[in-house]
């Protein structure tokens, strides 16, 4: 990758606000789960916000983004509607998926999200197929596939990377390597540590990136997206750590003593604090940072109020839409 | 009207779809091969280009997922599995993804993908090159399943499947590839969900799927000479299936046999019999019967294969059994081992 471009303060402020917004939304969701207002499984990306924020800032509105069970951040960073997300998690018909999916099934076609689903690695081949469609339909959209380190243990991950390489499709594979698949650490699951090597072995260029450095992620993403649009698939392994458990708001420390020690180190390496420090070093005053914080909290509060005010789902509607309307 | 073989009719459907709609493409293993998918795609890669007829790596799961993703993003893919057995490696994109997508996202986006599965059995190919798994897929909400038995329907159902707007598992059978029949010119659709009465009769209704249709017609002809009048219904569409057509026939004949060349238990025939017992029990004069495969994998040896697959004789025997039993007689005497 070429040398990093010096970013402007307003641009970094945008990345900072995007990350902070994701975190405040997820803390709100964690509260809803803890209070028992939400039952559906919620997988939080607190601690990993630099990856969705940094990658999506390099995309056009019409580029595709595919995700999995842990995709609140992808949805928000790509421009999905916040009230729609919260309403979805509350099971409301006004939710982004009509209240049919909950946290693990997010939908925002107006910003290129045609569905996120929790079957691990399931959307990786779908992302490759959407890339094929963009080429056949003669658009220059790229298709970004977000997945965790666990997904790279699935066979169809490897199959999909091979298809994208073989057919030179505009796919950006983004592995959010948070070092754990549920309760198992990376070294308990694979002998070779560098996941990026699995893509290189199939002819896809790639890099490892500090996934807690939003500027590093964004710089890599700009290069990767340009490569995908012009040449073919590319792979980014972004190393990070999730602060909460695999699912739900708890910190998941029962997984092991080592995880507790690791977590302390990773919390000291908070991507939001790092971006905040960069802004302050660049001359931004504390008042401006506080205003961003205030705006995020107010937006979440207002969105939650709107989402809660919407009507609940009706039992008699549960059977609708097994099939979609005919298309010509 | 001109006649085509079943394989030629499938090829013609592909060619017309590819010529008329730039969104249509085909992906799967062996589609450039002169023999892999029989003669059902002969020369299409030359005619339409290898970027629209895509022979694929040995990756059933990702290739099917790619087709699902392409469908979501605006294309009309046909993904081909030259042997249905291998399609089990693609169950996640078919069952978890394509089938659920419309429901999970509130009907906002369907998956207009055709998953073409070829049943290719016999010839001592043994258990993993023989399976006919329509019931597995018909079990799943959100999937449609069709099984054409005639050249006319092989063409018209493929065209309807591409434009259904939902995932359709289209199952064709290599044993039918050489069968000839009248096929209309041009693009026409055979509506998914409709069956077809191929022979009118008054004594027994035989509902058959795919390869069992010609065998049922053969059985009906023989039974006619023996004085039994058989009505033959080609189911064509396993899911949804034409309940009105089947039930109206059963109300007329009072007897029902379902012939389906797949395992008997939990199968297509079981579903139809269960529905008949629920909906038209009063009309049934005799216990309905199934003509299916036994609950074993497919054998290899030709001697065992011959006994394994049901024939016109199997169907005729089942029909005759329904004419010699009645519900009253059965309920009057318990079987000896009860």
Image: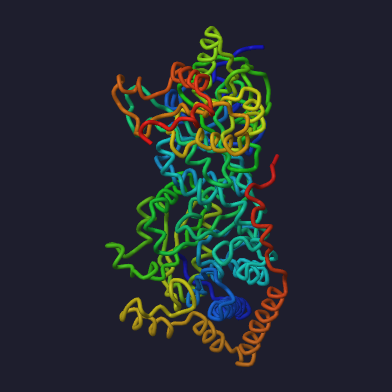
Q: Quadrant of residue B294?
A: top left
Q: Residue at x 39, y 58 (%)?
A: A152
Considering the image in quadrants, where does the C terminus of chain A appear? top right
In depth, the one of A296 and B210 nearer the eye is B210
Label total for image = 0
Which residue: 37% across, 55% down? A200
Left or right position of A86 against B38: right
In this view of the protein, can residue A291 be seen by the observer?
Answer: yes
Residue at screen point 43% across, 51% down: A161
Quadrant housing residue A23: bottom right
A151 is higher (above) or lower (below) than B130: below
Residue sitting nearer the eye, B93 or A220: B93
Question: Which of the two residues, B62 or A19, is positioned nearer the viewer here?
Answer: B62
Residue B247 shown left or right of residue A185 in the figure: right
Q: Position of residue B130 (x, y in %)?
A: 39, 30
Quarter of the picture containing the N terminus of chain A is bottom left
**Residue B106 drawn at (x, y percent):** 65, 56
Residue B250 appears at what percent x and percent y?
Answer: 62, 27
Q: Residue furthest top?
A: B225
Q: Is residue A125 left or right of residue A137?
A: left
């Amino acid at each position: 990758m070429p040398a990093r471009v010096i970013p402007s303060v307003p641009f970094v402020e945008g990345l900072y606000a995007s990350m902070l917004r994701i975190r405040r939304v997820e803390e709100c969701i964690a509260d809803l789960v803890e209070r028992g207002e939400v039952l559906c499984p919620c997988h939080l990306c607190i601690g990993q916000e630099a990856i969705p924020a940094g990658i999506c800032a390099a995309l056009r509105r019409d580029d595709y983004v595919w995700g999995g069970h842990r995709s609140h951040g992808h949805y928000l960073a790509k421009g999905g509607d916040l009230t729609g997300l919260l309403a979805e998690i509350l099971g409301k018909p006004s939710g982004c998926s009509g209240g049919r999916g909950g946290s693990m099934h997010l939908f925002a076609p107006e910003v290129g999200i045609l569905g996120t689903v929790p079957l691990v690695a399931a959307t990786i081949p779908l992302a490759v197929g959407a890339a094929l469609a963009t080429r056949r339909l003669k658009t220059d959209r790229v298709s970004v596939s977000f997945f965790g380190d666990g997904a790279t243990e699935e066979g169809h991950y490897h199959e999909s990377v091979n298809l994208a390489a073989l057919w030179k499709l505009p796919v950006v594979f983004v592995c959010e390597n948070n070092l754990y698949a549920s309760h198992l650490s990376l070294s308990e699951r694979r002998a070779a540590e560098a996941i990026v090597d699995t893509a290189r072995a199939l002819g896809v260029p790639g890099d490892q990136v500090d996934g807690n450095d939003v500027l590093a992620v964004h710089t890599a993403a700009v290069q990767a997206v340009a490569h995908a649009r012009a040449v073919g698939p590319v792979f980014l392994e972004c190393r990070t750590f999730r602060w909460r458990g695999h699912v739900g708001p708890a910190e998941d420390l029962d997984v092991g003593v080592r995880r507790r020690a690791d977590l302390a180190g990773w919390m000291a390496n908070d991507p939001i604090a790092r971006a905040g420090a960069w802004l302050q070093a660049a001359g931004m005053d504390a008042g401006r940072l506080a205003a961003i914080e205030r705006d995020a909290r107010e937006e979440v509060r207002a969105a939650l109020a709107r989402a809660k005010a919407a009507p609940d789902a009706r039992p008699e509607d549960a059977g609708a839409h097994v099939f979609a309307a005919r298309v010509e | 009207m001109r006649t085509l073989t079943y394989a030629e009719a499938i090829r013609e459907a592909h060619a017309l779809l590819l010529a008329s709609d730039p969104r249509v493409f085909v992906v799967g293993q062996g589609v450039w091969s002169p023999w892999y998918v029989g003669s059902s795609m002969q020369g299409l890669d030359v005619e339409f280009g290898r970027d629209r007829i895509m022979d694929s790596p040995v990756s059933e799961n990702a290739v099917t997922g790619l087709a699902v993703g392409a469908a979501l993003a605006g294309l009309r893919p046909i993904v081909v599995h030259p042997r249905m057995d291998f399609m089990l490696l693609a169950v996640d994109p078919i069952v978890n993804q394509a089938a659920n997508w419309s429901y999970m996202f509130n009907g906002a986006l369907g998956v207009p993908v055709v998953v073409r599965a070829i049943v290719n059995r016999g010839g001592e190919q043994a258990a993993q090159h023989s399976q006919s798994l329509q019931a597995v897929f018909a079990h799943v909400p959100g999937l449609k399943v069709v099984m054409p038995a005639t050249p006319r329907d092989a063409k018209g159902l493929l065209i309807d499947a591409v434009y259904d707007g939902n995932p359709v598992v289209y199952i064709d059978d290599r044993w039918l590839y050489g069968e000839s029949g009248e096929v209309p010119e041009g693009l026409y659709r055979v509506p998914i969900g409709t069956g077809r009465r191929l022979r009118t009769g008054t004594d027994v209704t035989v509902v058959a799927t795919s390869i069992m249709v010609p065998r049922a017609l053969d059985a009906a002809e023989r039974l006619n000479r023996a004085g039994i009048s058989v009505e033959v219904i080609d189911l064509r569409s396993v899911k949804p299936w034409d309940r009105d057509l089947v039930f109206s026939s059963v109300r007329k004949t009072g007897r029902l046999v379902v012939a389906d060349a797949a395992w008997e238990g939990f199968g297509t025939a079981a579903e139809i019999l269960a529905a008949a017992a629920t909906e038209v029990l009063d009309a049934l004069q005799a216990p309905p019967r199934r003509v299916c495969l036994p609950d074993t994998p497919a054998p290899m040896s030709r001697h065992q294969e011959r006994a394994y697959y049901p024939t016109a004789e199997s169907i005729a025997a089942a029909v005759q059994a329904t004419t010699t039993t009645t519900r009253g007689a059965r309920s009057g005497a318990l079987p000896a081992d009860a």
